[in-house]
Image (cartoon, helix red, strand yellow):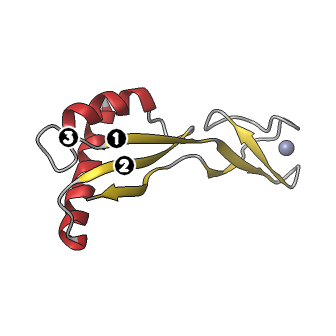
Amino acid sequence: MHELSLCESVLQVLEQQAQIENYQTVTAVYLEIGALSGVDPEAMRFCFDSVVQGSLAEKARLEIIEIAGQAWCSACNANVLVEQRYESCPNCGSYPLQINDGDQMRIKQLEVA
Ligand SMILES: [Zn+2]
């Protein structure tokens, strides 16, 4: 389950930021998870709760923002929504598409105390 190591790296970022920005507690983490990132939001929630035990983010609320997959279709000359990374264009069937959103996971915002 790679979500566990992802949660651990999220926590590392929180700890590094805490030193830079001088906060002691994280009260909320807003995490963007793209539909094409291969990250399971439910698994992230599950892992997050156990990974943050005893850390500065122990009481933090995890807010997951799911980002739809978006790709550029050069045949349609438009952005289209995709659910899978290797999907053809839902409008014209063209392939491959150039993914331009929804393939990332990143910390969007933190609430700290
Ligand atoms: Zn198309």
Q: Which mark is residue 109?
A: none
Residue that numbered label 1 is attached to: 61
The amino acid beneath tag 2 is: Val
**Element at badge 3?**
loop
Q: Quadrant of ligand 1?
A: top right
**Front residue of 92 and 31:** 31
Q: Earlier in the sequence, mark 1 or mark 3?
A: 3
Residue that numbered label 2 is attached to: 29
Q: Earlier in the sequence, mark 2 or mark 1?
A: 2
**Element at badge 2?**
strand
Task: Provide residue 30's location: percent of width, then percent of height.
Answer: 43, 49
Task: Provide residue 84's location: percent of width, then percent of height.
Answer: 63, 33
The amino acid beneath tag 1 is: Arg
Which image quadrant is residue 67 in?
Answer: top right
Instruction: Give the residue displayed 19% in from the left and 58% down from the top.
Output: 15
Q: Residue furthest left?
A: 54
Instruction: Give the residue displayed 34% in from the left and 41% down from the top.
Output: 61
